Amino acid sequence: MAREHGRLDAIWIKRVHRGKMDEVAEATAVAGQGLAGNVDRSRRRQITIIEREVWERVMAELDADVAPSCRRANLMVSGVSLAETRGRTLRVGAVRLAIGGETTPCERMDEALAGLRAALRPRWGGGVFAQVLDDGIIAIGDSVTWEEEKPTPHPN
């Protein structure tokens, strides 16, 4: 399997429910919790991630130029594909994130731009949610890579 190398392009923290997304240059990841200061997190959905390439494709399809913070995710990465990655581990800087599944676009997307929810639905376009495995600081520009898959033991 070829190893993908990407980059952390943006970090957003939501400080109040249904509040605006504050862009920050760095954030503290807390194992088992999410990003320090972010209100929307649960045991399973501690952090959310979108792909820059998907966002740019959707904006071109909709002939729009809406800020990616409207997706209301915590991280934007480039250079790695998030589709069909449930169960994989993504390393952002020194922090590992266990991908729990697809983030389904909600009605808030159409509040930001008519048609955005439907445009993000195919091929995991709404991004992924993950659990934070390590404490650490992440910063814009950090390297983003998939951890190598452990080979499945062959039964004898």
Image: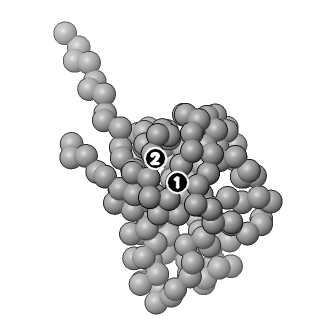
Mark 1, secondary structure of its residue: strand
Vertical position of residue 87 compared to residue 21: above or below? above
Residue closer to the observer: 4 or 43: 4
Residue sitting at the far right: 16
What is the x, y in percent for residue 97?
50, 41
The spot of residue 37 in percent (x, y) is 74, 50
User: Does residue 61 appear left or right of residue 70 in this picture?
Assistant: left
Q: Quadrant of the C terminus?
A: top left
Q: Where residue 98 sits in the image (x, y, percent)? A: 49, 38
Q: Local crowd at mark 2 within 10 Å, few (<14), some, or many (≥20)?
A: many
Quarter of the image that includes the N terminus: top left
Q: What is the spatial separation of the Cα atoms under label 2 and label 1, in whole angstroms?
A: 9 Å
Give the residue at x 26% y 26%: 151
Q: From the viewer's perspective, is 137 left or right of 96? A: right
Residue 113 x %, y %: 61, 82
Visible residue check, residue 115: yes
Q: Residue reaching furthest bottom?
A: 63
> Which residue was labeled with disc 2?
92
Residue type, mark 1 in image: Ala
User: Which of pointers 2 and 1 indicates the residue nearer the eye?
Assistant: 1
The residue that mark 1 highlights is 139
- Image quadrant in which you'd find residue 8: bottom left
Earlier in the chain: of badge 2 and badge 1, it is 2
Verify CB contact (< 8 Å) between mark 2 and mark 1. no
Name the residue type under label 2.
Answer: Val
